[in-house]
Each structure stands twice: as structure tokens, then as C-alpha cells.
Image (spheres, rainbow, N blue to C red):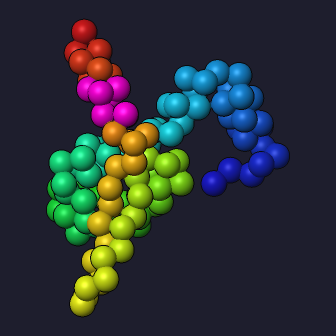
Amino acid sequence: MIKETSSNAVNKAFLLKSCRINGALDLISGRWKALIVIHISENTNRFSLLKIALHSISDQTLGKQIKELESSGLIIKNIIAEVPVKVEYQLTPKGEALLPILSDLSNWSDI
């Protein structure tokens, strides 16, 4: 977390305001976010399943990335009232719309 008054925070705010592409990239920036979105789209949609699929990610990092994806409106958390309670994640329409973009980015990186 950076201080709001730091030059990094000021520069980030300027870039996000000045260029919508920077805002879009900010939503998916982070080492794990794209993979998390892809795995959720493939029904690897519970924390424990994501942890297995992304075996080298720490619990803390996975939790943080999930919260950021939730706050960005890319995924939602569904609490299933069973015993024990289950939590599953699902892509929002915004998250679904991101999938072809991630595919295009992947194809572009191969050029």
C-alpha cells in the first residue's frame, strides 16, 4: 500500500485519469489475477481448488488477489448455506467479457 501523498500515488492517479488503458490494466495487474480469472471460468471456483491449481501461491496472496478481483467487479463470492458452509467464486459479466481479451493478449505475446 502506498501513501496517498507519495509521488507514486500521485503519478498513478494521474495515469489512471489520463488513460483508460492504464485503468483497464490496473484491474488485471498482479502476477496471479489473470490465472485466477481463467481458473474460475473453468470451474476451479473455490479457494481450496484455486490453491491446488496455483500451488505456489500463498494463502495470503490468493486471498488478497481474490478480494481485489471482487472489488474490481470481475468476480463475485457466492456463499452456499450447507454444513459446512461453502464459498464459490463466479465471474461477473465484466469478468466474462475479460476472457477473450486475455486470450487476445496471450496470442499477441506470442508474436
- Label tally: 0
Please identify the quadrant where the N terminus is shown. bottom right
- Residue 31's place in the image compared with 11, above or below, is below
Q: Position of residue 61 (x, y in %)?
A: 40, 60
Residue lying at the far right in this picture: please name it. 5
Please identify the quadrant where the C terminus is shown. top left
Is 99 contained in the magenta span? yes
Q: Residue placed at 30% from the left, 76% from the top? A: 80
**Residue 31 appears in the rendering:** no
Describe residue 110's horizontal placement relative to residue 21 as left or right: left
Q: Residue placed at 71% from the left, 28% from the top? A: 17
Determine which quarter of the picture holds residue 109.
Answer: top left
Q: Nearer the viewer, residue 35 or 46?
A: 46
Q: Position of residue 88 (x, y in %)?
A: 29, 66
- Magenta span of residues: 97-103
Determine which quarter of the picture holds residue 77.
Answer: bottom left
Q: Residue placed at 24% from the left, 90% from the top? A: 83
**Residue 74 appears in the rendering:** yes
- Residue 24's place in the image compared with 64, above or below, is above
Q: Residue placed at 26% from the left, 43% from the top? A: 38
Q: Position of residue 55 (x, y in %)?
A: 20, 58
Describe residue 27's horizontal placement relative to residue 19 as left or right: left
Q: Nearer the viewer, residue 74 or 48?
A: 74
Q: Position of residue 3 (x, y in %)?
A: 74, 51
Describe residue 60's horizontal placement relative to residue 27 as left or right: left
Type of secondary structure dominating the magenta stretch: helix
